[in-house]
Image (tube, grey):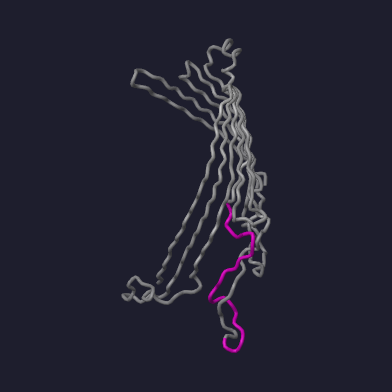
């Protein structure tokens, strides 16, 4: 009963520029990285419907496909971009005391110009206890031991573009005509989309973690334990349950930074690796994890 044409064309471009630095000052080791990342995305989707094609006359081309259905024909285009500055600074003293700072500052055109940017830092620290002289003298059965801790913030822009400003949809036969020729007829018109939210911004997650790594039996047995806590807040959510919104203002609301979820859990891994002969080695690993979460908003 219908003939439908649909195509999607998209293009993604990304460019990165890196600068790296490494230097050793006696027992002090310093390394750093700085980067610029730029992305650009273009997307176009076309969808066309023809009604009542003539049986036997359709030859694969649109002129023979029937009558164009203007109500269900559309072209959707969007352009968006992203820009980020990121860096990492690492320091360790004699391989025993480890400290690292990372950051990203990201801009996304999915948000209004005043809310383009989000800042996402993180810091982690480690202590290789097994490199301490007092530990090697007193705890001979542990070959390697490292304690770790970290905290950082990440973000997402998982929202459709242009939700921060009013957009309109064209309908070929949904407008009311006026005047002598079109009075009382259905003509082309514009319908407002969802009521915009100019305050939309990045949703955020604060991640915390503690961990320990062990090496036993001449480092043939490796054990690792991690405990994590994630706090997701300002999550971008669609207000799907809203009712009573008049069609004169779009009949819907744009997303809001509203949701919240807390998650936590533990992960344990054990790996045994050994070398039987000069040219034969093997490893066996086991991983186990347990987690839970609670919706806070």
**Residue 81 image-quadrant placement:** bottom right
Question: Magenta segment range?
Answer: 158-181
Whether residue 261 is visible, yes or no, is: no
* 112 magenta-colored: no
Q: Residue at x 63, y 42 (%)?
A: 120
Q: Establish if 285 lies above or below 230.
A: above
Taking the view exactly as shown, the residue that stands out farthest to the top is 137
Where is residue 263? Give x, y as percent.
61, 39
Where is residue 88? Give x, y as percent.
58, 37
**Of the pair 56 and 131, the residue shown nearer to us:** 131
Whether residue 242 is visible, yes or no, is: yes
Q: Establish if 131 lies above or below 252.
A: above
The total number of labels drawn is: 0
* 160 magenta-colored: yes
Q: Establish if 225 lies above or below 106.
A: above
Q: Residue at x 43, y 22 (%)?
A: 273
Q: Residue at x 59, y 53 (%)?
A: 108
Taking the view exactly as shown, the residue that stands out farthest to the bottom is 180
Where is residue 225? Give x, y as percent.
56, 27
Q: Residue at x 58, y 22 (%)?
A: 26
**Of the pair 290 and 109, the residue shown nearer to us:** 109
Which quarter of the rendering shows the N terminus? bottom left
Q: Is residue 17 left or right of residue 250?
A: left
Where is residue 274? Give x, y as percent.
41, 20
**Of the pair 296 and 165, the residue shown nearer to us:** 165
């Amino acid at each position: 009963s219908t003939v439908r044409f649909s195509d999607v064309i998209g293009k993604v471009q990304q460019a990165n520029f890196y600068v790296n630095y490494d230097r050793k000052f006696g027992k002090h080791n310093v390394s750093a990285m700085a980067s610029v990342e730029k992305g650009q995305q273009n997307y176009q989707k076309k969808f066309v419907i023809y009604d009542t094609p003539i049986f036997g006359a359709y030859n694969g081309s649109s002129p023979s496909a029937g009558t164009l259905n203007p109500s269900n024909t559309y072209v959707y285009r969007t352009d968006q971009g992203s820009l980020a500055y990121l860096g990492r600074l690492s320091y360790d003293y004699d391989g025993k005391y480890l400290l690292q700072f990372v950051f990203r500052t990201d801009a996304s055109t999915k948000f209004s110009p005043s809310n383009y940017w989000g800042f996402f830092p993180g810091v982690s620290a480690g202590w290789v206890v097994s490199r301490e002289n007092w530990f090697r003298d007193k705890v001979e059965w542990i070959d390697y031991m490292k304690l770790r801790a970290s905290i950082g913030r990440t973000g997402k822009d998982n929202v459709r573009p242009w939700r921060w400003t009013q957009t309109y949809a064209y309908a070929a036969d949904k407008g009311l005509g006026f005047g002598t020729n079109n009075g009382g007829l259905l003509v082309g018109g514009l319908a407002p989309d969802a009521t915009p939210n100019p305050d939309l911004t990045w949703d955020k997650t604060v991640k915390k973690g503690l961990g320990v790594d062990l090496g036993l039996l001449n480092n043939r047995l490796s054990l690792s334990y991690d405990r994590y806590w994630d706090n997701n807040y300002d999550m971008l959510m669609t207000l799907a349950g809203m009712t009573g919104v008049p069609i004169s203002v779009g009949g819907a609301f744009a997303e809001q930074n509203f949701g919240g979820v807390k998650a936590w859990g533990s992960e344990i891994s054990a790996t045994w690796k050994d070398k039987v002969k000069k040219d034969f080695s093997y490893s066996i690993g086991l991983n186990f994890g347990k987690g839970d979460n609670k919706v806070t908003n």
